[in-house]
Amino acid sequence: MPPIMAAAPAIKRPRLRVLNDRQIGFVLERNSVARIAFQRDGRIELMPVHYVMLDGAVIGRISLGRKYLSWLVANEVVVEVEETTGLFDWRSVVIRGSVSLLRSHGGTDVQREQFHRAVTAIRALIPGAFTESDPTPDRRFVFRVDPTEITGREASTK
């Protein structure tokens, strides 16, 4: 005789919908951890980063490494931010754009100003950033992702 299997509890069917610009903005402002995907040596790489939004751009910082060098030659990236409260209750924002590294020296006055504004924004998230009390002192390089496309989706059982 085959084993009797208990019926699984019914799960409410999720509704999927597209987020509008305002809802996308709320998701991006509420969060501070994203994943950034980029191409390196013919492979797609994905890494978590802390970020802040500044003037419509994603600002973050990284340590020196191969990703830094790959961004100099292939600057197209995808950034994803998600909020999850359950298996079928989530929001996801995807930003496609180009990444650039901001510098405190050299470049134009505008580029140096962008760097200093980015550091101020990062310090609002991580007050010790770029100081002796920095929790991740190896992350000295500031990046900026200028979006070319931003989309958002949501699933909800509520």
Image (cartoon, helix red, strand yellow):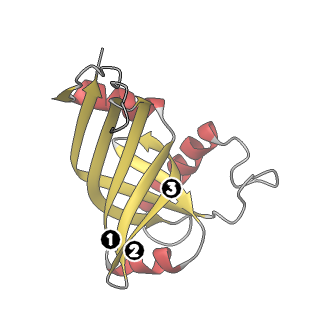
Residue 115 locus on image (x, y percent): 51, 56
**Could you say which quadrant of the image residue 61 lies in?**
bottom right
Please tell me whether residue 55 is drawn above or below residue 143 in the rendered image: above
Q: In what element is the residue under mark 1?
A: loop
Residue 130 locus on image (x, y percent): 70, 55
Task: Say which mark, if any, is on residue 17.
Answer: none
- Compared across the picture, whether 127 is left or right of 17 comes to right
Badges 2 and 1: C-beta atoms under 8 Å apart?
yes
- Amino acid type of the residue that numbered disc 3 sits on in the rendered structure: Pro
- Amino acid type of the residue that numbered disc 2 sits on in the rendered structure: Trp
Task: Say which mark, if any, is on residue 71.
Answer: 2
Badges 3 and 2: C-beta atoms under 8 Å apart?
no
Looking at the image, which residue is at 23% across and 44% down? 150
The residue lying toward the viewer, choosing from 17 and 60, is 17
How far apart, in angstroms, are the residues tagged by discs 3 and 2?
Answer: 16 Å
Q: In what element is the residue under mark 3?
A: strand
Please tell me whether residue 33 is drawn above or below residue 70 in the rendered image: above
Looking at the image, tell me whether mark 3 or mark 1 is earlier in sequence order.
3
Which residue is denoted by mark 1 in the rendering?
A: 75
Looking at the image, which residue is at 69% across and 50% down? 129
Give the crowd class for mark 1: few <14, some 14-19, many >=20 residues within 10 Å.
Answer: some
Marks counted in the figure total 3
Give the crowd class for mark 2: few <14, some 14-19, many >=20 residues within 10 Å.
Answer: some
